[in-house]
Image (cartoon, rainbow, N blue to C red):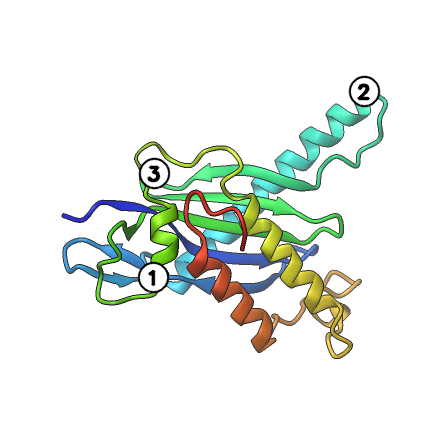
Amino acid sequence: MASTIPSIACLGIIGRNNNPLHTTIFPSYDPSTNTLSPIRTPLQFSLLLSSTLDIFELRARAAAAGATGAGAGAGATTGDLGLLHAVDDRLAAYGFETNTGARFVAVVDMRGRPLDGAGGGAAGPSAVDRDRSRGAAAVGLREGEMKPVFKAMQAAYVKLLQNPFYDPDEHTPPTGQGGKRITSRMFSEDMRRIGETWAPGVTNL
């Protein structure tokens, strides 16, 4: 059986009103068939992303309480939150919150991609395979492994906000009710590239 390494199973963006803005799902390695296919259905990933909202809220309240106790104001709730929770023996959710309240979630499959690039000819650049051959998958992810992912997601999101044809209020209304999903083809391509390119040890996306 092929050795496996972590890969991204899903990237999600949630608006400041807890409304889903974007989801991209990536295939995972199935050793029984030596192929790549999503490890969860779109509905299951949607529920998984929704389950992280409680953790974001708990982290925000804890940070606000700590900041208030230190007399420093309650602004230390944004940025890389690291591991949000381990879903099961394969999936783990990592989170990042922007200073505008948008939340980025990366769901990682700890055995998502074969190290040798096998698996039905699915995506996965061979140059990255060489970078990730350090065996990091056997012990999980090191601290900071997801920083390049969130940095790239934030850059793509900022680029989207700079598009004069994109109206943020249509997607995250000030009223807190409803909101459209992001439909930008360029943004979706950026998310796809980030998810397909990342692997343990990759520092620039």
Q: Which residue is mark 2?
A: 70
Q: Which mark is residue 183?
A: none
Q: CA distance from mark 3 to mark 2?
A: 41 Å
| Residue drawn at the location 42% of the way across and 62% of the way down | 25
> In this orientation, which residue lies closer to the viewer: 173 or 111?
111
Dot 3 or dot 2: first in sequence order is 2
At x 75%, y 48%, the residue is 99
Q: Secondary structure at mark 1?
A: loop
Q: Quadrant of residue 38?
A: bottom left
The image quadrant that residue 124 belongs to is bottom left
Residue projecting furthest to the bottom: 165
Label 2 CA crowd tier, 10 Å (few <14, some 14–19, many 20+): few
* Placement of the C terminus among the 4 image quadrants: bottom right
Three-letter code, disc 2: Ala
Tell me the residue that label 1 is attached to: 27
Write down the residue under mark 3: 134
Label 1 environment density (alpha carbons within 10 Å; few <14, some 14–19, many ≥20)? many
Closer to the observer: label 2 or label 1? Answer: 1
Q: Is residue 167 visible?
A: yes
